[in-house]
């Protein structure tokens, strides 16, 4: 069974299980030095979208060029942290249609893929996530008129990258994905609902199904999974339930506490022993 401890290092406070399998680092991902280079098997994350979501400690409405500069910095650091056969599953919007009005629509997916390749990531594939509970549209542009209609795709994407070579050679070599899951999930169109932000207590949580699929499809049992923008902790919950070692970095102390409490309740980190079947 697990117990918990708090580690204080300067302004950083981290939650960690005694065996070190689950770690929450309260720090800025760009400046933290608490993760070793070439140590991560898989990154699963959804960074801020820059659409003016009201996070606690992060301004989510900066000029688009500054957002792309931020993206290049964190993707560069993430590249350094993964193993040579390490992978990245990046959940981002297809485009940006809200936020700063003067910037209008932005091709977020195309721009981020270009930046990722620039800093060294190799592109593998794109999964289209069809959220079945997408909110009702309120913006149509020119209603029933060809002058300026808006075309908005009610989907997000999960872009899959790798560092040096796609074939995974490190780790336990043990996969826990079922035949049915493999057949369904290797189809690049995933349909499942999003998460209720009021239920979770975070303005932009993604559902457990998203990291669950990425982790089972792209990592071995006991691999090390990182979420550099942990938020409400969903990636670490999936790690705990799926016998992976998980590290999450979150700049907001309040969300670190939320993630810890969710891990105890939903990840059951104090109620079960993790074993490799």
Image (spheres, rainbow, N blue to C red):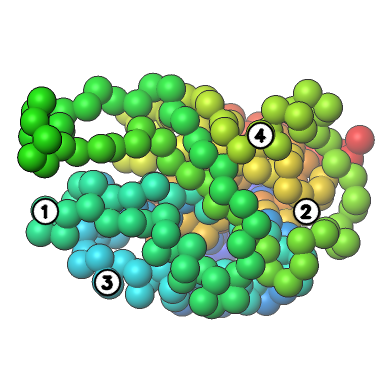
- Callout 4 environment at 10 Å: few (<14), some (14 to 19), or many (20+)? few
The residue that mark 1 highlights is 101
- Mark 3 / mark 1, whichever is N-terminal: 3
Question: Along the line of sight, which residue is nearer the eye, 130 or 90?
Answer: 130
- Proximity of marks 3 and 4: CB atoms separated by less than 8 Å: no
* Image location of residue 12, percent across then percent down: 47, 67
Q: Identify the mark nearer the N-term, 1 or 2.
A: 1
Q: Position of residue 39 (x, y in %)?
A: 72, 69
Mark closer to the observer (2, 3): 3
| 243 vs 53, nearest the viewer | 53
Q: Which residue is mark 3?
A: 65
**Residue 159: x percent and y percent?**
55, 52
Position of the N terminus, as image quadrant, is top right
Please give left or right for residue 95 compared with residue 35 in the image.
left
> Mark 4 highlights which residue?
187
Disc on the earlier residue, 3 or 4: 3
- Label 2 CA crowd tier, 10 Å (few <14, some 14–19, many 20+): many
Secondary-structure class at tag 4: loop
């Amino acid at each position: 069974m697990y117990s918990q401890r708090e580690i204080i290092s300067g302004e950083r406070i981290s939650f960690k299980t005694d065996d070190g399998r689950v770690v929450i680092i309260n720090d800025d991902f760009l400046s933290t030095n608490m993760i070793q280079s070439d140590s991560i098997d898989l990154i699963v994350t959804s960074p801020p979208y820059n659409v003016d979501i009201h996070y606690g400690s992060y301004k989510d409405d900066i000029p688009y060029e500054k957002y792309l500069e931020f993206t290049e910095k964190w993707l560069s650091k993430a590249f350094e942290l993964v193993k040579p056969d390490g992978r990245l599953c990046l959940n981002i919007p297809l485009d940006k249609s809200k936020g700063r009005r003067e910037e209008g629509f932005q091709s977020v997916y195309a721009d981020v893929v270009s930046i990722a390749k620039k800093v060294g990531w190799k592109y593998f594939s794109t999964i289209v996530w069809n959220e079945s509970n997408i909110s009702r549209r309120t913006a149509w542009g020119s209603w029933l008129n060809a002058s300026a209609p808006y075309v908005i795709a009610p989907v997000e994407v999960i872009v899959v990258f790798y560092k040096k070579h796609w074939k995974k050679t490190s780790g336990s070599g043990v996969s826990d994905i079922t035949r049915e899951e493999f057949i369904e999930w290797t189809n690049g169109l995933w349909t499942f609902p999003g998460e209720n932000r009021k239920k979770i207590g975070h303005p932009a949580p993604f559902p457990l199904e998203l990291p669950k699929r990425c982790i089972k499809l792209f990592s071995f049992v006991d691999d090390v999974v990182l979420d550099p923008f942990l938020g409400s902790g969903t990636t670490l919950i999936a790690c705990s339930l799926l016998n992976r070692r998980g590290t999450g970095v979150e700049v907001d102390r309040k969300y670190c506490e939320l993630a810890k409490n969710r891990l105890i309740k939903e990840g059951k980190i104090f109620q079960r022993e993790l074993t490799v079947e």
